[in-house]
Image: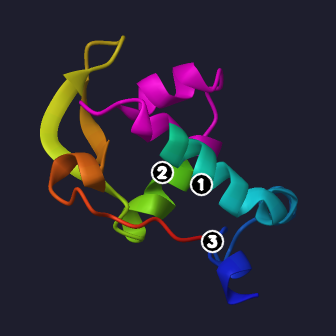
Amino acid sequence: MDDFRKLFRRDAMDTSIEAAASIYPSLKRLQLEVIRFAMTRPNGFTDEQMNEFFDTHRSTYRARRSELVDKDLIVDSGRKGSMTNGRKATIWVLKQFSSSPNLQIEF
């Protein structure tokens, strides 16, 4: 249950809590989808590219990517890419593509 509470702010509105509750059962499935996407991008990807791949503009996949960063499975490549609006964005990469070829992914 503590993991569920991490999905929303302490002062979150009811709608945010309901959204978190709706995604909680599929959290690991969505994390796995992000891992699979990252595996197809050995040179890395931006959040914008990831959202384009998943055909969304919402934060669902970005949040899952962030969780995978917290689990040290996806890392900041140290490089920046350009977004469609011209701004710079972090290029994320699956850790196994950055420095650890024998990474074991466990869920």
Q: Nearer the viewer, residue 61 or 104?
A: 104
Q: Which residue is mark 1?
A: 31
Disc 2 or 3, which lies upstream in sequence?
Answer: 3
Disc 3 or 1, which lies upstream in sequence?
Answer: 3
Asked if residue 26 lies left or right of residue 63, the reply is right
The residue lying furthest to the bottom in this view is 2
Image quadrant holding the C terminus, namely bottom right
Occupied quadrant, residue 34? top right
Query: Regarding mark 2 in the picture, which secondary structure is present there?
Result: helix
Question: Could you give the CA–CA distance between mark 3 and mark 1, rounded to whole angstroms?
Answer: 20 Å
Disc number for residue 65:
2
Residue 35 screen position, x and y as percent: 50, 47
Q: What residue lies at 54% left-to-right and 28% top-to-bottom?
A: 51
Residue 104 screen position, x and y as percent: 40, 67
Question: Could you give the CA–CA distance between mark 2 and mark 1, rounded to whole angstroms?
Answer: 7 Å
Against 4, is 37 above or below?
above
Task: For label 1, count other residues whose C-alpha is less than 10 Å away and answer few (under 14), some (14-19) or many (20+).
Answer: many
Asked if residue 30 lies left or right of residue 49, the reply is right
Q: Nearer the viewer, residue 12 or 42?
A: 42
Amino acid type, residue under disc 2 in the picture = Arg
Question: Which mark is in front, 3 or 1?
Answer: 1
Asked if residue 47 lies left or right of residue 21, the reply is left
Q: Which residue is mark 3?
A: 9
Q: Nearer the viewer, residue 73 or 55?
A: 73
Against 71, is 54 above or below?
above
Query: Regarding mark 3 in the picture, which secondary structure is present there?
Result: loop
Q: How is the image coloured?
A: rainbow
Residue 66 screen position, x and y as percent: 45, 56
Occupied quadrant, residue 69? bottom left
Span colored in magenta: 37-62
